[in-house]
Amino acid sequence: MREFHLNNFQFGQIQSVFSVVYAVMAPLAGLFIDRVGLTAGIMLSMTVWSLAGCATGFTQSFRALLGCRTVLGIAEAAGIPCTGKANGTYLEPGELALGTACNQVGITIGSVAAPLLVAAIAPRYGWRATFVVCGLLGLLWVPLWWITSKRIPARAETRKSAPTAVGSILRDQRLWGLVIANALVMSVYTLWSNWTTVYFVHERHLTEIQANQGFAWIPPVFATFGGFFGGWLAFRWIRGGIGVLHARMCVCWIGAVILLATAAVPVMPTTALTAAAISLSFFWTLSLSVNMYAMPIDWFGPSRAAFGVSALTCSYGLMQAFLSPVIGATVDHFGFNAVCLGIAVLPLAGIAILQAATRGANQRTNPAEQPIIT
């Protein structure tokens, strides 16, 4: 922001460009992964993503920065659909939310490592070096996945399942209810994944290094715990005989009500309590998210796991493309109080829409929707 003389609105624009491409490419990426298979799809997308990350470190203009973010968005659009495909390929239905929580561990490691890497590398070598280092780490990951995937076979029923027609999926009102709900719930995720450091600098008057080293890495850790808690709670209820969808919706309703407390973040009296409030908000956002991202696999099966999950990826990207500049402009004019108050009510509205969509739809006969009793 300092080097290119960006204000908060322009910083939001950078995120918006990434998010638009991310959203538009997600369904295509999902179809591609379902067609070519998980291993080929994830290795190709990770290679392109890593190269785009490295290239970011060599940009010399705002336009070049936007270009690198565009390519990064194209490649990253395959990331979450790949995790959905992996979950559908290797996990039992009752384990899907826990699987998504395990995927979140990787996101959390990145979220925790990012501000710490910036604090360690940027003061000595500049911000560009952090992008180059992270891109190179991504390239090192590609052969590790190839070796691992060769040693672990898919579930037998996964290999035999026939794919649901794409047209049938697109006509299913449950999917569209889930798409809208995901966009509203993940607005909280966008807020804390992209604006936590800015919040501590803007509202708590910390330096960037103080914010990153002392506080910004904490909420993503609690987000991971929240993902595991939401996955474990649904897993326990499903194993106890409760229907899969009902168990997931119960977790979502509980979390959506608690997320109303996001509005209280700006009134916390100390910086430590602010970090605690953000952590609570992030915790319950992921408790909802892991269950919502399991629903397309519940409904449409592992053969369409990547495409089903890509619909949620698309909705998240479109939401972030719209919301990021709005957050930036609102912060510039009114501060974070208005942002937190407005976003706090969105998850509850989203879960209400999802409840209406699933209640009105005819239930499919996918075995994944049946309760699992031990």
Image (spheres, rainbow, N blue to C red):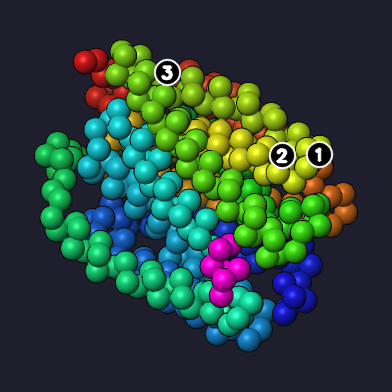
Label 1 is placed on what type of residue? Pro
In the visual, does 319 lie left or right of 72? right
The residue where tag 3 is placed is: 246
Label 3 is placed on what type of residue? His
- Residue 350 seen from this side: yes
| Residue found at x 78% / y 38% | 268
The residue where tag 2 is placed is: 273
Please report the bounds of the magenta region as a residue range: 115-121
Q: Are marks 2 and 1 in contact (CB under 8 Å)?
A: yes
- Residue 295 seen from this side: no
In the visual, does 296 lie left or right of 91? right
Does the magenta segment cover residue 265? no
Alpha carbons under labels 2 and 1: distance apart: 7 Å
Work out whether mark 1 precedes mark 3 in sequence or the reverse, and give the earlier one.
Answer: 3
Alpha carbons under labels 3 and 2: distance apart: 34 Å
Tag of residue 269: 1
Q: Quadrant of the N terminus?
A: bottom right
Work out whether mark 3 precedes mark 2 in sequence or the reverse, and give the earlier one.
Answer: 3
